[in-house]
Image: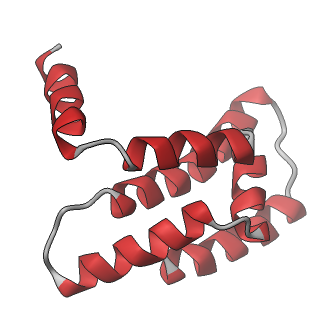
Amino acid sequence: MKYIKNNAKNAKELLFLQQPKDNKELDLYRSLWRAIIFQAVMDATTTSKQKRNRIHKIRALKWLSENSSDFKEVCQFAGLNPGYIRQSVLSLINQPKEVLRVRAYRKRKN
């Protein structure tokens, strides 16, 4: 997450220097910010036993659950409501692992 935070700060600077020219470019910017949130969710839900992945998991859970200005900014740039995203992600994370596996299996099957 530290890597993502540093890159997010650099990307924020670029975003302020160059405003999107049109809706297509704005969608590309939003996709970038949504990818940051998605990666945090992936890190927070990992079941890996590797030390590096457990550290990423702890940092991601902290970032997703705290009311930090960084999280709010990333959600704002992604065009998403931070409160809604936090609530949705935390309820997803708190579901039993069996439910998550069934949902993932159904998505792959379709």
The location of residue 79, given as percent across then percent down, is: 74, 39
Q: Residue at horizontal 71%, vertical 38%?
A: 25
Side of 78 relative to 42 (left or right): right
Q: Quadrant of the C terminus?
A: top left
The location of residue 75, given as percent across then percent down, is: 71, 50
**Visual colour scheme:** secondary structure
Q: Residue at horizontal 21%, vertical 86%?
A: 51
Q: Nearer the viewer, residue 26 or 98?
A: 98
Q: Is residue 93 above or below residue 46?
A: above
Q: In which image quadrant can residue 68 be found?
A: bottom right
Q: Is residue 62 above or below residue 34?
A: below
Task: Determine the residue located farthest toward the top in the rendered image.
Answer: 110
Q: In which image quadrant can residue 53 be found?
A: bottom left
- How many marks can you see? 0
Q: Nearer the viewer, residue 28 or 67?
A: 67
Side of 47 relative to 54 (left or right): left
Q: Is residue 49 above or below residue 95?
A: below
Side of 17 relative to 42 (left or right): right
Q: Residue at horizontal 76%, vertical 66%?
A: 12
Q: Nearer the viewer, residue 93 or 105?
A: 93
The location of residue 39, given as percent across then percent down, is: 43, 57
The location of residue 108, given as percent across then percent down, is: 15, 25
Q: Residue at horizontal 26%, vertical 84%?
A: 52
